[in-house]
Image (spheres, grey):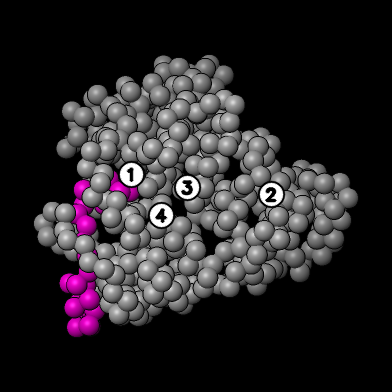
C-alpha cells in the first residue's frame, strides 16, 4: 500500500483546469508541466485496491451495512436503503433473463430478495423518486434538489419544449385531469393518433415532457407503466429545496464517488450524465477539492502506468482495510449494473469486456442478446446469456463464455450464481 498524502488543493485546482479544457482529464500527451508535476505528487492506489473498493462501495463485498438476508416484513425498506447507498437504480424494460435490470441489481446485493418485488418498489416507499439519473432511474429524495438544473434544462430543450408548445390542448387536458382525478397513465388519454412507438402519441410525449421539466412526477408504476401525478403531491418540495447548478452537480459527483470508490472524472460524469454540464462540473470539482470531500488519486497498474482519478478521503483510507474481505461465491449481475456499465472501467479494474449486444443483429453478436456477467470473489469470471420462459416456469442458458484467466473459478461459481438466480426470479433452470 503506497503511503497516503494529505490532499493538496493547489494540485487539485491545476487539474480542474485541465478537466475544464479537455473535458475528461489528464491522460493527454500535451499536459502542461504543472499538470505533470501534480500527477506525480498524487497519492496512489493499486488496481487490486481499487477493484476491492469498487465492490465494497457498490455493495458486493460482504459489506456489514448491507443486509445479509432480506426479511419479508421490511424488504421494501431494505431495497430502498440499497438504492440510497448506490445513489441510483437504473430502470430497463428487458425481462428476458427472468427479471428486469432493477430487480437483478437489487437481488445481486440483497440475499433472498425477490426480483419481482422491485417492480413495485417506487409505490412501496416514500423515500425514492423517478427521474433522469443514469438514464431513467429511481433515486433517493436527497438528490431531488440537486437535479433542479436538469429540470430547468428540459424547459428549453427543443424537442421537449416543442411538445408543450405544439400541443397546448394536451397540456391543459393532462394537467386538469390529473389535478381532478389523481394519478393517471398514458392509456387514460384517448383520441390521439399513434404510429406504433411509445412516443408516437402526442399525449405520451407531452406527459414525458411535463415529467422531465418537473410539472409532473411519477407516482408509481403498475405493470411497469408509469402513473403521473402533480409534483407537489408526490415530492415533499419543502424538504427538497432546489440547489444552484454547481452545488447540485457537486452533490451528484460526490454521490457517484461514494458509489464507485476510485473513479476517473469520466466515470463520475457519466454516472449522472453530466458531460453537457462541463463548466458546472469544473466548478463543482473545485468546490469538492477545496472542501476536502474529494481528492486526486492515481491508479497504478501492474505494469507501472498511472491513471488519473479521484476518490473520497475516507475511501482512500478504507481501501487498505479490505484485504481480507470476500466477495460472493457466485452471483449474476445485470449488464446495466453500476459495476460494469463503464466498459473502460470494467476492463481496467477487472480485465473484463463488458459489452451490450441487444441492439445488434443476431449474426453480429459475439456473446449473446442479454449477457449477464458472473461475479465470483473479486473477479468477473464469465458471462451467460439467459432466456426465461415465464409460462413454463423455467429459464435456460443459451450461451456461456468464461474469461480465460478465470475459467477454473468460473466452473465453481456458475452453479452457485444460477442457483441464486433461480430463487431471485422464481424460475427453475432448464
Q: Tell me whether circle 1 and circle 2 mark residues in contact (CB < 8 Å).
A: no
Which disc number belongs to residue 218?
2
Q: Nearer the viewer, residue 364 or 63?
A: 63
The residue wearing badge 1 is 55
Q: Nearer the viewer, mark 2 or mark 3?
A: 3
Residue 246 seen anywhere in this rendered image of the structure: yes
Q: Position of residue 23 (x, y in %)?
A: 37, 73
Report how far apart the C-alphas of labels 4 and 2 lie in the structure: 26 Å
Label 1 vs 2, first from the N-terminus: 1
Which disc number belongs to residue 258?
4
Label 3 vs 1, first from the N-terminus: 1
Q: Please, what is the dominant secondary structure of the magenta stretch?
A: helix
Report how far apart the C-alphas of labels 3 and 4 lie in the structure: 8 Å
Q: Quick one: SS at disc 4? A: helix
Report how far apart the C-alphas of labels 3 and 1 lie in the structure: 13 Å
Q: Quadrant of residue 254?
A: bottom left
Amino acid at each position: 500500500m503506497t503511503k497516503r498524502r494529505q490532499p493538496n488543493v493547489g494540485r487539485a485546482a491545476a487539474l480542474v483546469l485541465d478537466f475544464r479544457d479537455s473535458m475528461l482529464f489528464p491522460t493527454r500527451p500535451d499536459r502542461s508541466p504543472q499538470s505533470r508535476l501534480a500527477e506525480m505528487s498524487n497519492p496512489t492506489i493499486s488496481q487490486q485496491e481499487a477493484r476491492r473498493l469498487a465492490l465494497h462501495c457498490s455493495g458486493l463485498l460482504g459489506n456489514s451495512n448491507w443486509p445479509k438476508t432480506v426479511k419479508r416484513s421490511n424488504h421494501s425498506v431494505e431495497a430502498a436503503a440499497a438504492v440510497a447507498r448506490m445513489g441510483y437504480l437504473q430502470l430497463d424494460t428487458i425481462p428476458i433473463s427472468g427479471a428486469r435490470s432493477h430487480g437483478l441489481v437489487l437481488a445481486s446485493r440483497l440475499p433472498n430478495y425477490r426480483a419481482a418485488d422491485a417492480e413495485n418498489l417506487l409505490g412501496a416507499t416514500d423515500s425514492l423518486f423517478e427521474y433522469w439519473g443514469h438514464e431513467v432511474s429511481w433515486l433517493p429524495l436527497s438528490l431531488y434538489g440537486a437535479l433542479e438544473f436538469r429540470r430547468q434544462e428540459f424547459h428549453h430543450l427543443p424537442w421537449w419544449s416543442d411538445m408543450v408548445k405544439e400541443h397546448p390542448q394536451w397540456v391543459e387536458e393532462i394537467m386538469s385531469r390529473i389535478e381532478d382525478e389523481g394519478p393517471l397513465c398514458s392509456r387514460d388519454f384517448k383520441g390521439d393518433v399513434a404510429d406504433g412507438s411509445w412516443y408516437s402519441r402526442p399525449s405520451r410525449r407531452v406527459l414525458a415532457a411535463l415529467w422531465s421539466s418537473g410539472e409532473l412526477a411519477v407516482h408509481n408504476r403498475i405493470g411497469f407503466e408509469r402513473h403521473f401525478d402533480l409534483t407537489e403531491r408526490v415530492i415533499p418540495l419543502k424538504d427538497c429545496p432546489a440547489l444552484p447548478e454547481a452545488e447540485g452537480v457537486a452533490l451528484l459527483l460526490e454521490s457517484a464517488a461514494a458509489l464507485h470508490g476510485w473513479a476517473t472524472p469520466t466515470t463520475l460524469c457519466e454516472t449522472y450524465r453530466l458531460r453537457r454540464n462541463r463548466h458546472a462540473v469544473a466548478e463543482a470539482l473545485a468546490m469538492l477539492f477545496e472542501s476536502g470531500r474529494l481528492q486526486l488519486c492515481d491508479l497504478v497498474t501492474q505494469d507501472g502506468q498511472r491513471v488519473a482519478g479521484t476518490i473520497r478521503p475516507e475511501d482512500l483510507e478504507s481501501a487498505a482495510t479490505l484485504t481480507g474481505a470476500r466477495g460472493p461465491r457466485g452471483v449474476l449481475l445485470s449488464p446495466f449494473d453500476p459495476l460494469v456499465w463503464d466498459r473502460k472501467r470494467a476492463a481496467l479494474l477487472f480485465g473484463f469486456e463488458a459489452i451490450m449486444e441487444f441492439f445488434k443483429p443476431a449474426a453480429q453478436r459475439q456473446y449473446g442478446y442479454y449477457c449477464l456477467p458472473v461475479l465470483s470473489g473479486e473477479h468477473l469470471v464469465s458471462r451467460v446469456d439467459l432466456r426465461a420462459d415465464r409460462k413454463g416456469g423455467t429459464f435456460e442458458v443459451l450461451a456461456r463464455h468464461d474469461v480465460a484467466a478465470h475459467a477454473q473459478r468460473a466452473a465453481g461459481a456458475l452453479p452457485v450464481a444460477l442457483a441464486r438466480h433461480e430463487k431471485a426470479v422464481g424460475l427453475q433452470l432448464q
